[in-house]
Image: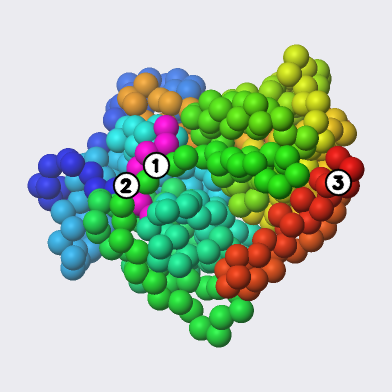
Amino acid sequence: MEENGNNNKVSFRSGLLFGLTIGLTVALIVGIFAVVKIKSISNALGSVLDLKTASKISVISKVIDDCFYDYDDRKLTVDDMRDGLYRGIVSSMDDKYAEYYSKEELEQEIIDNQGIYYGIGAYISLGEDDYPFLSGIMADTPAEKAGLRAGDVLVKVDDESTYGMTLDDVVSRVKGDDGTVVHLTIYREGENDYLEIDVTRGAVETLSVGYDMLENDIGYIQIVRFEQATVNQFTEAYEYIKENDAEGLIIDLRSNPGGLVSSVVGIADQILPEGLVFYELDAQGNRKEYRCEGDNAIDIPLVVLVDGYSASASEILSGAIRDHGIGTLVGEKTYGKGIVQDVKQLSDGSAVKLTVSAYYLPGGDNIQGTGIEPDVTVELDVDAYYDEGIDTQLDKAIEVMNEKVGQ
């Protein structure tokens, strides 16, 4: 993301030191108060910003200021270096989901969660190998038109390696202005070499719920992500299914990377019986429960489609359905993300996102790193899906549903 600060080149040393006002104040007090007073002030600064840290940053900044040859003439600003300090603290955690947001980045994140942005129309997740991958492709978007597929691994974006990038770093590089082109280097299973694909960015409206009536009066609802608008979209889809006298319902959570907790709870409340949806345990062992009243418990057979890209909030919903015994899971083992992130906004408008808790399904399982095994395992025949439009997993779900309703 480009910053709009002034472009006057500043001393790296002075840029780094501007954020250490408190540390310098403490240094001044050193000459005035006793050692015991110095120690108490240093303790008040916390374990990160102490006198030793301030001194080392001063030394490093002097080396950079004296020796660094700015070959790209990047014109670093004070704001750039200030953000660099903050990002450095956050990135030091062993948490691949942690992010520091400037005020502008946080505002963009909020807009994105509302469902409209400029990009390619693909959901991006992080793989265990530290490479990002496309966990879902939205219909009628630049990504679909360019031939991208769920499961494609993003090796490079505009010839820059994505290895070890945070999720937000990758997303920010893929997004861009309407009509601009992003060049993606893709690893796709079954291909002998990397694929080089250009995608022209465009406006993407993230309709997160799709629905239809299938043969034998079977309702079908697909949820591609849990966003702010998803609950209302699901309500509309569910009403349509009920108005058409569906004898059973298939909920498709394949390639759903998750999203907002409030959204998944709002949907669970429309189908689950009374009881626990899931609960969280934070670092202090505090338990927070999410429950539903059960006034709208589903009264028709239910089948849920999942795969290896079903993660986080989609695992909460499918796991709760499994544990309450109201549906059959069909497909492949889910991704296995059993932790929760939260965004903590700071007084200056910036924010920190970090993992704040682990979540547990109603039966007590935490599925971090293990995922959820389906009741009926069936792999997607990728070639048949893309070449012939045959969805082997959906076909199996329909078969299971037909057995439930006696067809």
Check the image and report above or below for 347 versus 218: above
Q: Which residue range is magenta in the image?
A: 114-120
**Labels 3, 1: front one:** 3
Image coordinates for residue 140, horizontal then vertical, percent:
42, 53
Q: Nearer the viewer, residue 109 or 151?
A: 151
Q: CA distance from mark 1 to mark 2?
A: 7 Å
Point 55% across, 41% down: residue: 210
Report whether 292 appears left or right of 326.
Answer: left
Tell me if I can see residue 303 in this picture: yes
Q: Which residue is mark 2?
A: 203
Which amino acid, by three-letter code, is at mark 1? Glu
Q: Is residue 153 above or below residue 327?
A: below
Q: Horizontal and vertical percent for residue 63?
A: 28, 58
The quadrant in which residue 351 appears is: top left
| Spatial separation of the CA atoms under disc 2 and disc 3 | 43 Å
Mark carried by residue 205? 1
Disc 3 marks which amino acid?
Gln
- Position of residue 311 in the picture relative to residue 399 (left or right): left
The first of marks 2 and 3 along the sequence is 2
SS label for mark 1: strand
Residue drawn at x 56%, y 60% as measured from the top left: 150
Please tell me how crowded label 3 is: few (under 14), some (14-19), or many (20+) other residues with Cα within 10 Å. few
Mark 3 to mark 1: distance in Å?
38 Å
- Asked which secondary structure carries label 2, the reply is strand
Q: Which mark is residue 407?
A: 3
> Position of 141 compared to 280: left or right?
left
From the viewer's side, name the closer residue of 16 and 163.
163
Upstream in sequence: badge 3 or badge 1: 1
Q: Residue drawn at (45%, 77%), measured in percent from left and top?
A: 195
Quadrant in the picture for residue 378: bottom right
Q: Mark 2 is on which residue type?
A: Ala
